Each structure stands twice: as C-alpha cells, then as structure tokens.
Amino acid sequence: MDGDTLTEQPLVAILLCTYRGQHYLVDQLESFASQTMTNWHVFASDDGSQDDTLQILARYQKQWGVSKLSLLSGPAKGFSANFLSLVCCTDIHADLYAYSDQDDIWEPHKLQTAVNWLQSVPADVPALYCSRTQLVDADNNHIGLSPLFSRPPCFANALMQNIGGGNTMVFNHSARLLLQMAGNNLDVVTHDWWTYLVVTACGGQVRYDPCTTVRYRQHGANMVGMNSSWIARLARARLMARGRFIHWSNQNIDALTRLENRLTPENREILEIFTQSRQHRLLPRLRGLKRTGIYRQTWLSNLGLIVAVIFRKI
C-alpha cells in the first residue's frame, strides 16, 4: 500500500448492482476484501432478487459491518437504471466512485491503480479511469483478453462507442456531480457509455489503461457480455441494418441536452454538427460528419462506420 494509512486514502464508494447473483457474488465480494486499497464502502443495490443474493449480502454486511457495506433497493428498471440510481443517490458520499457488476473478480490492485491516476488529476476536473479486462469463463479460467484500444479517448469517439466496461470504471467526485446533474430518469443506452460521454463532453480526462484490472466472467446469464467475437460483430451489423444505432444516437443526443451548458464550446459544436448532419443528404452528410471527427477504435469498425454514414444508419 506504499505506506499509505487508512486516513490518507480517499474513500471509494463501490457501486454494486445485483440481481439474481447468487452463483458468483461471493467471488466478487471476496475480491473487494482482497484489495490493496482498503478505504472503500460497498453500496449494494438489489433489483428484486428472489434467490440467495440478499442473504449473501446480509451475511457479508454482518461480517464486515455497516461501515463497509450498505444495502439498498433498486428501481427494478434494468441494470443501467440501477447504476444511475446509485450514482444519483444523495445519501452516498465519497471521494471516488467505482461501478461493480456482481459476477466479476477484481484484481487486488484494481482500486489502487485507479486511485493513483485519479489523484494526479485536479479535483475540479471530471476524471474517469477504465481498463482492459481479462476474460474468464464461468469457472474463472482464462479464455482471452478484451480488445486493446490505442486511439485516444475523446468526445468524438464517445459519440460512436464506449471503450471502457463499467466493471472497470472508477471516477472522481467532479464526474459524479455531472452525472447527478443529468439525473437518473434518463433513457440512455448503458450507464457506462453514458459516463464516458458525460466526462468527455464536459472537458474531463479519461484514462484507458491497457493493463487488465478485472477478471470479466463470461457466462450464459451475462446481462452484457464481451462483444469482440465475429458472432458479436455480425450481430452488431444486423442491429445497424435495423436502425438500432440511429436509436442509440438519438438517446445519447437527447440525454446530452441535460448538460448542454456544461459541454465545452468545442464539443457543443461537434454535437450540433453531428445532430444536424445526420439529417442531410449523402454528400452534405459525409462532409458534416467528417467535420465532427467522429471515429471508432479499429479500422474494421471505422469501415462499418463509413457504411453506416452512407446508408444513414447512425
């Protein structure tokens, strides 16, 4: 712990959302206990589990004490709404905030690594840390790595994709205030993509760590699984053809209007050009969207982006 004492560490609120998580929850909770950074508090929001999830949480609350684990009831509107309810909960106070799924396993250095970077950013600047993940199967056996992204995080990229899984995200209080300002009654695609959009749109800093900090469990009950396989790519192509990306862009644009006065002038202009260009005929559409600088992280996905622009599918 580099000599840090508990009082010198920032307090990290671990925002844990659960729903029928009895099979893997214990492994995740134990990985919290194994963190080298020890000043954390788990806020577990359950979305109506009818298995042993609540009993497991109650057992750990008794073991750790209420100073380490608080239990809340989720809105029962899906995982993204549950995470946003935690982010916007005014009873939760901390220096830093970490999203957590119920079925992964955090590497022991996860929080400390994120904290080290976040503390290098001025407190009044919104900041978001995220990382690559190690993929494991249901029995925690290594099966691969998530894609390695090399292009810089920015708003023009965030308009097109999310580069950080929510299970890796840790962010500071300035970022949390922006999320609270937007509110939790939002129709967003996912909470993690929304977080990436908000921080970049409002001039914040994002650190994408190429080193893995989470063992991302792949199993049949995943709410959101890894999306880098060819099967997943074909599924995204079908979604694009059906106009799903148009719907997602509309959701993101509508949600960002909540924070219009907090966007940087540059990003406000990018959003305006992006919004207007989507409605134009082919050549003006191509010119306008090129001006925004939008991009995805890989050449293949950028090829798909060009196709989507041509056929008005974003």
Image (spheres, rainbow, N blue to C red):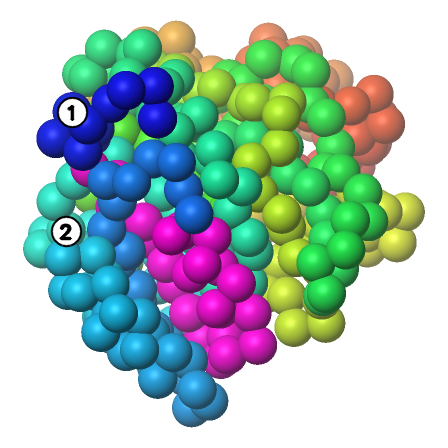
Which mark lies nearer to you, 1 or 2? Answer: 1
Pick whichever, 96 or 306, lies toward us: 96
State the CA–CA distance, disc 1 to disc 2. Answer: 20 Å
Quadrant of the rendered image containing residue 201? top left
Q: Position of residue 99 (x, y in %)?
A: 40, 47
Q: Is residue 60 visible?
A: yes
For the view shown, which residue lies furthest in the bottom direction? 50
Numbered circles on residues, count: 2
Q: Amino acid at mark 2?
A: Ile
Mark 1 residue crowding within 10 angstroms, few (<14) / some (14–19) / many (20+): few
SS at circle 1:
helix
Q: Quadrant of the N terminus?
A: top left
Magenta run includes residue 68: no
Question: Which x, y percent locates residue 77?
Answer: 38, 72
Q: Which mark is residue 92?
A: 2
Is the residue 169 above or below the residue 239 in the image?
above
Give the labeled residue for mark 1. Answer: 8
Residue located 79% across and 30% down the image: 301
**Residue at disc 2, secondary structure:** loop
Q: Residues within 10 Å of mark 2 (few under 14, many from 20)?
A: some
Would you say residue 31 sits in the magenta stretch?
Answer: yes
Where residue 97 appears, as percent x and y from the top left, is 29, 40
Identify the magenta region.
Answer: 11-33
Answer with mark 1 or mark 2, whichever residue precedes in sequence.
Answer: 1
